[in-house]
Image: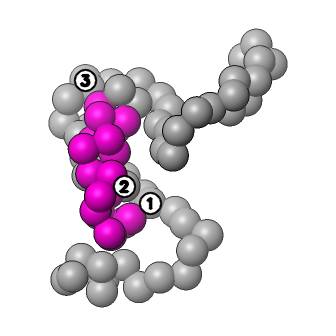
């Protein structure tokens, strides 16, 4: 991960990452949902946890992906 503020680069060891003021809550959610099949719901749950527990995070949120999927189908699964 690249940090523009000090031009540092960090090597990451893991399958997921979160960044920002609510990242600890988001990573905790991602850790507990590692066996979920639905990636959209994992992301939504992680961001929702950050918004709920971090006073500096706020809704609404937008989830942007390069994967072409019908997220409405994932919600009903």
First reached walking from the N terminus: tag 1 or tag 3: 3
Q: Which x, y percent locates residue 10?
A: 69, 24
The residue under label 2 is: 43
Quick check: 3 left or right of 28? right
Tally of numbered tags: 3
Q: What SS does tag 3 mark?
A: loop
Looking at the image, is mark 3 or mark 2 nearer the viewer? 2
Determine the residue positioned at 41% across, 24% down. Answer: 21
Q: Which quadrant of the structure image shows residue 62? A: bottom left
Q: What SS does tag 1 mark?
A: loop
Q: CA distance from mark 3 to mark 2?
A: 19 Å
Residue farthest to the top, as pictured: 6
Say whether marks 3 and 2 touch (CB < 8 Å): no
Image quarter where the N terminus lies is: top right
Determine the residue positioned at 25% across, 23% down. Answer: 55
Determine crowd level at label 3: few under 14, some 14-19, many 20+ residues with C-alpha closer than 10 A: few
First reached walking from the N terminus: tag 2 or tag 1: 2
Residue 31 falls within the magenta-colored stretch: yes
Q: Is the residue 4 above or below the residue 49 in the image?
A: above
Q: Which x, y percent locates residue 50?
A: 29, 36
Q: Which x, y percent locates residue 20?
A: 47, 29
The residue under label 3 is: 55
Q: What SS does tag 2 mark?
A: helix
Determine the residue positioned at 52% across, 63% down. Answer: 64
**Magenta region:** 25-42
Q: Nearer the viewer, residue 52 or 41?
A: 41
The residue under label 1 is: 63
Q: Is the residue 39 above or below the residue 48 in the image?
A: below
**Residue 57 can be seen in this image:** no
Residue 37 falls within the magenta-colored stretch: yes
């Amino acid at each position: 991960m690249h940090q523009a503020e000090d031009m540092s680069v960090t090597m990451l060891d893991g399958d997921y990452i979160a960044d920002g003021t609510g990242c600890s809550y988001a990573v905790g959610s991602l850790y507990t949902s590692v066996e979920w099949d639905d990636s959209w719901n994992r992301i939504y749950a992680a961001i929702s946890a950050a918004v709920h527990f971090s006073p500096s995070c706020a809704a609404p949120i937008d989830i942007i992906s390069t994967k072409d999927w019908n997220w409405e189908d994932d919600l009903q699964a």
